[in-house]
Image (spheres, rainbow, N blue to C red):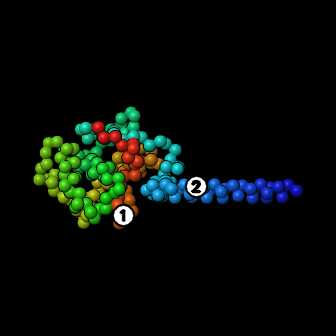
Amino acid sequence: MRHAKDTENEELKQFHCSILIKEMQEKVQMLKAYGMTEEEIISQLFCCHPLPKLMISRSYRIFLGDERKEVHLEPLVKSVYLLFLKHPEGINFKDLPDYREELTRIYDKVRPWGLSDRAIQSIEDVTNPLLNSINEKCTRIRKVFTSILDSSIAEQYYIKGKRGEPKKISLPRELVTWE
């Protein structure tokens, strides 16, 4: 008698679970239709910490959260980060030469003492998809954010993406403030 009741309860649980899963699948499809990737959805669902806001000051200093913890990046690395932050759709590394002028303008603002020949060469290197410079800058950005944020949320703040697809910063732009 007890065994039949346990089986009935288990079947009822499975039925309710199947309904909930179907509802979740529909909601996930809606999120995808709004442009979220599966990685972003999973991260948002299972992230136990709220994402801190990112603030870019007039002098291009980067701060995290209400406590305004500064994110320290060297000027060219910071310029690359700001370039990607300005392009929520992402940038294919192979298209980086198309962003050379924009990166130069950003770098000129971040590095107010002017652009030397060496600085110009560094910009050319980082926008040359045949060189490894952009990957090195992205690695530095990732290291900084993983050193100051919990690993479960840090990935929202650094540049990432699959091979051959646009690389981007997943952080929802409503959490980004430009002074």
Quadrant of the frame with the N terminus: bottom right
Mark 1 vs 2, N-terminal side: 2
Q: Amino acid at mark 2?
A: Met
Q: Position of residue 18 (x, y in %)?
A: 66, 58
Mark 1 surroundings within 10 Å by alpha-carbon count, few (fewer than 14), some (14 through 19), many (20 or more): few
In the image, farthest residue toward the right = 1
In the image, what residue occupies the spot 45% across and 55% down? 34
Q: Is residue 116 above or below residue 162?
A: above
Quadrant of the frame with the C terminus: top left
In the image, what residue occupies the spot 31% across and 58% down? 91
What secondary structure is marked by label 2? helix
Q: Is residue 118 visible in the rendered structure shown here?
A: yes
In the image, farthest residue toward the top = 67
Q: Position of residue 105 (x, y in %)?
A: 19, 49
Residues at discs 1 and 2 in contact (Cβ within 8 Å): no
In the image, what residue occupies the spot 28% across and 48% down? 82
Real-space Cα separation, disc 1 to disc 2, in angstroms: 27 Å
Q: Which residue is mark 2?
A: 24
In the image, what residue occupies the spot 36% across and 35% down? 68
Q: Which residue is mark 1?
A: 165
What secondary structure is marked by label 1? loop
